[in-house]
Image: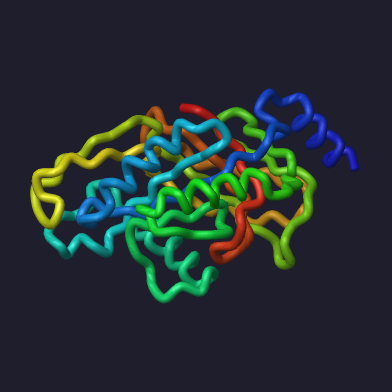
Amino acid sequence: MRTAALFSLILATSPLAAAAQTPTVVELYTAQGCASCGEANAFVSELAERPGVLALTFPVDYWDYLGWEDTFAKPEFAERQKAYVAHLDLREPYTPQVIVDGRAQAAGLQTEKIDKLVEAAAEAPRDPPDMAFIGKARADVGYGRAPRGGADVWLVRYDPRRLEVTVKKGENRGQTLIHRNVVRELVRLGSWRGRPTAYRLPPAGEENLSTAIIVQAPNGGRILAVAEKGS
């Protein structure tokens, strides 16, 4: 009882407690070797400026064989996308693809559809647990309603800058592609089962990255809560 009470007190007094509205998470799966990804990258870069939206760019590596290896891609990003493919009953992964709050998806060039999905997600009822960062090495998730079997807690570290990459080979040769909020680290911290739980954060592998903690139903399910911390 004393431990739970202390945990609740920390959440209540922390300036980073997630009492504010949980942002809508927009995930872009893209690749520098994908001929149609440039426009989607630019659109998601604009989305990143909207209040109440956390836009994340996940570069994938399965188009590298087209002649240009994506400079930001990591295999774990493609694995995350595959989980969505299975959960949303899609045929196969593709780029550019946008996932909104783990609930719905659209092709990255379907900007009107994406706008509607973001609006619907913002209006959907939510009851997220309180969340807080405690220093640089810990994140806490409080009481709440967890899915059957619990939820996954993910650490996402991303570069908040607007990055440009000039592609020298392949289908996009000669083009300069815009990137925003490129994910650099994706780590599963553990499970959350509705009770207050503390998670240790590994040291960042790069400087000046922003951090998000995402509580999500397993295997590419819906996103339940998000806490953000700047670089």
Q: Nearer the viewer, residue 105 or 57?
A: 105
Which quadrant: the N terminus?
top right
Vertical arrangement, residue 147 with respect to residue 101, above or below = below
Q: Is residue 183 above or below residue 85?
A: above
Q: What residue is rendered at 35% in x and 53% in y?
A: 109
Q: Residue at x 81, y 35 (%)?
A: 8
Point out residue 208 in the picture as x, y percentages from the top left corner: 40, 28
Which of the pair 191/23 is nearer the observer?
A: 23
Rendering coords of residue 101 (x, y %)? 57, 52
Which residue is drawn at the image coordinates 34% and 56% (left, top)? 96
Is 215 situated left or right of 73 in this image? right
Of all residues, the one furthest to the front in this rendering is: 112
Q: How many marks?
A: 0
Q: Quadrant of residue 23?
A: top right
Residue closest to the eye, 175 or 200: 175
Q: Residue at x 73, y 39 (%)?
A: 130
Q: Position of residue 181 (x, y in %)?
A: 40, 38
Residue lying at the far right in this picture: please name it.
1
Q: Is residue 213 left or right of residue 149?
A: left
Q: In the rendering, at what x and y percent does residue 100 appear?
A: 52, 52
Q: Quadrant of residue 52?
A: top right
Q: How is the image coloured?
A: rainbow
Q: Left or right? Give the position of 80 relative to 14.
A: left
Residue 132 lies, with reference to residue 213, above or below; the image says above
